[in-house]
Amino acid sequence: MNVPLQKPWNDLDRETVSSAPDRPGVYELGDADGTVHSVDHGVLRDELKTALAYGDAERVRWSEAHTLERARELAEEHRDRLE
């Protein structure tokens, strides 16, 4: 069984997005209660800019990966536990 990303939640705001690494990774978007609504991957700063622009969530947490391919694999593993 996969567990949630073992990272603290951050508010999804401009400050958080600007502090996100410009590197590949997997991220979870959630609500104020910490319920995960989606898991995705990509270049973290770019992905979070989009999520913020569309108001996709209130909170976010992420984990970096060495490659986009590894980030995709991690996202798939984490998505499986949400289903």
Image (tube, rainbow, N blue to C red):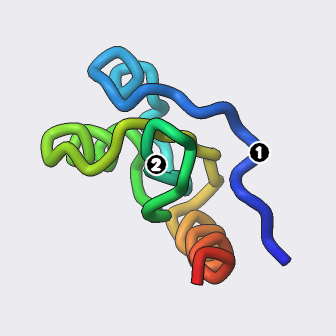
41 or 57, which is in the foreground? 57
Q: Secondary structure at mark 2?
A: strand
Q: Secondary structure at mark 1?
A: loop
Location of the N terminus by quadrant is bottom right
Q: Nearer the viewer, mark 2 or mark 1?
A: 2
x and y, in percent, of residue 53 in the image: 14, 40
The answer to whether 14 is drawn above or below residue 25 in the figure is: above
Location of the C terminus by quadrant is bottom right
Q: Look at label 2 and name its amino acid.
A: Gly
The residue furthest right is 1
N-term mark: 2 or 1: 1
Q: Which residue is mark 2?
A: 30
The answer to whether 29 is drawn above or below residue 15 in the figure is: below
The answer to whether 66 appears left or right of 27 in the picture is right
Can you tell which quarter of the image residue 8 is in?
top right
The answer to whether 48 appears left or right of 2 in the picture is left
- Badge 2 local density, few (<14 within 10 Å), some, or many (20+)? many
x and y, in percent, of residue 29 in the image: 44, 50
Q: Which residue is mark 1?
A: 6
Give the number of the disc on residue 68. Answer: none
Disc 2/disc 1 C-alpha distance (Å) = 14 Å
Residue at 71%, 57% (x, y): give it.
4
Can you tell which quarter of the image residue 32 is in?
top left
- Badge 1 local density, few (<14 within 10 Å), some, or many (20+)? few
Q: Look at label 1 and name its amino acid.
A: Gln
